Image: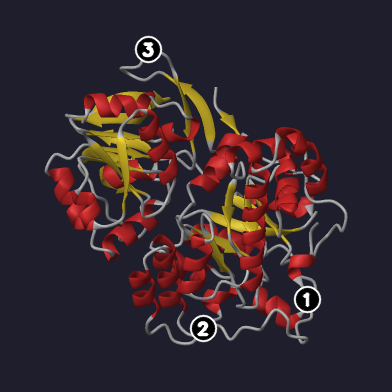
Amino acid sequence: MTTVGVLALQGDVREHLAALDRLGVKGMSVRRREELDACDALVIPGGESTTMWRLARTFELLDPLRERVRGGMPALGTCAGMVLLADRLLDAAQGQETIGGLDITVRRNAFGRQTESFETDLEVTGLAETVHGVFIRAPWVEEIGPGVEVLASVGEHPVAVRQNQLMATSFHPEVNADDRLHRLFVDTCC
Amino acid sequence: MNETGTSRVKRGMAEMLKGGVIMDVVTAEQAKIAEDAGAVAVMALERVPADIRAQGGVSRMSDPDMIDGIIEAVSIPVMAKARIGHFAEAQVLQSLGVDYIDESEVLTPADYENHIDKWAYTVPFVCGATNLGEALRRITEGAAMIRSKGEAGTGDVSNAVTHMRTIRREIRRLGALAEDELYVAAKELQAPYELVKEVAENGKLPVVLFTAGGIATPADAAMMMQLGAEGVFVGSGIFKSGNPAQRAEAIVKATTFHDDPDVVAKVSRGLGEAMVGINVDEPARSIQFAERGW
């Protein structure tokens, strides 16, 4: 059975673990190298991407994460998780590094500050009904490489993308107990 | 259609701060140090609580230029404090584009009867609480996040412990009550029945619960997280200590690895002097912040 880890350095870890649990997928929180080694796939939650990056760097998790993603481990990133899976960042903090893997350029906080955070209905490729997307100080995808499939957009900006076994969303499918994006990830990436 | 300022985006913002440390800062330089140390957000205020305590006088919302400077300096969320009941300060802070407003007992209250009607804003609010009833009244007024009050500016964690234990105990107690006993519980808590019922059913507040007030060391943060806090506010504890950058980073690490004593021990080494602190019961202490708000 596939075990899906949730990177638990900071952020809304519990919501992702609950979504996996509802889908009948075995989830576990990941803060250490051994825990990462025990996972077949990884979810990177919403939170503060600079905090997660610094903690991953300090606790020697960043390079193992890069190796696993490069080695083909499926990964889903939401919001801060999208930032961490991007190969390139705009409006990054000074020196900010990512795990990378997705051939995309992501702009941090592209939709604005908290007063501009919003919810909206989205058409998502591969899902029959619309998804209610919750965007919180959300990033968007500014450029995509040739192998990247856009699953959803807000205006002209991609907000959900997939490239082989990697998937990322600007919004938070984990916060409103709608597990279809997690199901899509488990079914098509894992 | 894009909807802004909904309960879901307000409460959701706090969900994203979980497991993180929010640090009080009074200048853009301090904000940068906090961001570099791994803070999930900074809290802009005019003076840290220890100085408010020492200097006395009326304490108000920060200077808008200072808040602008902090927003400019960092890419993480910026919170700012408004006085209890001072809805015009809150309007100004929203207009400046802060990401969260703390309606805070650390500042001098502007209204001794009413708190701010927080539903009227697009920006979310965090409020302090010493017990469950107070937390639920703030949520009823629209707070999207709750923190223990503790006793800010003392470096003494004991009140934060009392408030966190009290809130968690009262939540557990609700869970043990029969449904027909919840009506009286709501009366006793002076909170709406529907909200009391929701807490009884879920075993938790409908919003994120952080700790604040007196946290000064990595071990303080680790203890509060183990007591059920979902994240930590640190006020005077960082910038009133010997080595703010290193202490800030240590508290961030101890918060993430709060259940791993080896990590907490490691990060607690060589931090230099902690803030001197004053015991919450010292007669010299003139102000009891936690008694502000009701």
Measured in 3D between alpha carbons, the distance from the residue under mark 3 to the one under mark 2, in whole angstroms, is 57 Å
Residue A18, how many percent across, how many down? 42, 37
- Helix, strand or loop for disc 2: loop
Asked whether residue B37 appears in the rendered view, the answer is no
Locate residue B44: give its quadrant. bottom right
**Quadrant location, the C terminus of chain B:** bottom right
Q: Residue furthest top?
A: A128
On screen, residue A69 versus residue B209, left or right, reads left
Residue position marked by numbered label 1 in the rendering: B287
Q: Residue furthest left?
A: A71
Are the residues tagged 1 and 3 within 8 Å (C-beta)?
no
Q: Nearer the viewer, residue A174 or A2?
A: A2
Q: Nearer the viewer, residue B225 or A47?
A: B225
Residue position marked by numbered label 2 in the rendering: B274
Same subunit, tags 1 and 2: yes
Q: What chain is tagged by disc 1?
A: B
* Amino acid bearing label 2: Ala
Are the residues tagged 1 and 2 within 8 Å (C-beta)?
no
Are the residues tagged 3 and 2 within 8 Å (C-beta)?
no
Q: State whether residue B80 is above or below residue B216.
A: above
Locate residue A43: give its quadrant. top left
How crowded pointer 3 is (Cα within 10 Å; few <14, some 14-19, many 20+) is rated as few
Q: State whether residue A71 is above or below residue A34.
A: above
Q: Nearer the viewer, residue B246 or B198?
A: B198
